[in-house]
Amino acid sequence: VLHLSQDAVYRRLRGDVPLTIYETKTLCDAYNISFDEMDAYKRGSVNFSYMPLDRIGLNFESWLRGLRDGMRQIKAMDDAKMIMSINDTPIFQMFNLPHLTRFKFFFWAKTYLKIPAYEHELFKREKIDKEVLMIGIEAHNIYNSIPTVEVYSPETLRGTLRQIQYYFDAHLFEEPNYALELIDNLTDLVRHMKVQAELGRKFARGNEAPSAGNPLDMYFNETYIADNTYLVKTASGSFVYLTHNIMNYLNTTDPYYIQESEFVLEKLMNNSNLISQVNIKDRNRFFAGLEKNIQEFRQKIEADIANY
């Protein structure tokens, strides 16, 4: 990379000759290393990494590949565990209903990011490509195998419901009744999440629940969760993911930031009710509230279809 002789390289490796600023920059660029991250961590200043939009590819398949590959990396680490605060969309749980995931991506790409390829497209009923479906299934299976702690609030899925309502009102569904199918998918998702909470284990919808493994600790926070934070803890260290620019994420290994994120998540859990395996009253109340929200949206769209 530096176009140096072998002797010159060895002198730098031994520390006999220091790297110049130019050489340091060249190596950092060549191996995608952040020079800032090699400096001492400082409170109040955090370095984040992210996936540039052009590398995501801005299509459903490449976006799913990014999620799957990230889950693979986490799974490969010893004693991996994830703690999540979820303010609206449980994206990994949505893999249980692939068309919901497809709708979320379509909405982000067309309505938020205004990607030209989606400009004149309507959301329509179509089969998901088998290869794309397999990527999503693999990502979901990896997620299921990693122990997670997940904190939800009454706002869960409200954003998705409003997106479906918006597309219906804006005539962006090829068939108006498809809005009802997506809403019914949300009902199916909520009921499957409830079964997982009752058992304290994750599994794919339509499959039998495992007799062991796939642990899930689910919490219900009765107020409001401001953001999606994913804290990953492993035997070799921890890191944090934050949702970013709608369909992207930031991640960091900054120890101070991780320490504070873990502190906040612990306080959030302390102020929430554990509803997996125990506390049937609060569990039923939480999921009944979600179903009520969904049915109210469904009734409104049913009435609007009658006058469409």
Image (spheres, rainbow, N blue to C red):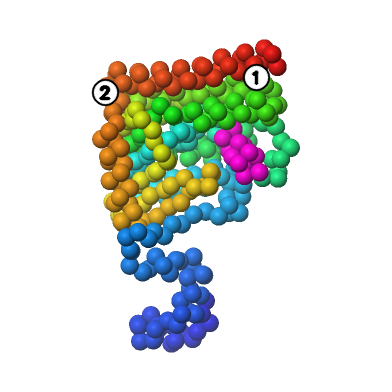
Residue underneath mark 1 = 177
Question: Residue 110: where, in percent of width, then height?
Answer: 65, 39
Query: Residue at 49% across / 39% down in the picture?
Result: 138
Q: Residue at x 52, y 53 (%)?
A: 51
Given the image, on which type of amino acid does mark 1 rest? Asn
Residues at discs 1 and 2 in contact (Cβ within 8 Å): no
**Is the residue marked by circle 2 packed among few (<14), some (14-19), or many (20+) residues within 10 Å?**
some
The residue positioned farthest toward the right in the image shown: 120
- Could you give the CA–CA distance between mark 1 and mark 2, rounded to whole angstroms? 38 Å
Q: What stretch is highlighted in magenta?
A: 103-114
What kind of element bears circle 2?
loop
* In the image, residue 113 lies in the stretch drawn in magenta: yes
- Residue 117, position as x, y percentages in the image: 70, 43
Q: Can residue 25 be seen in this view?
A: yes
User: Which residue is at 39% across, 84% downward?
Assistant: 18
Q: Is residue 177 magenta?
A: no
Image disc number at residue 278: 2
Amino acid type of the residue that numbered disc 2 sits on in the rendered structure: Val
Q: Residue 306 carries which label?
A: none
Splitting the image into 4 quarters, where does residue 265 fall?
top left
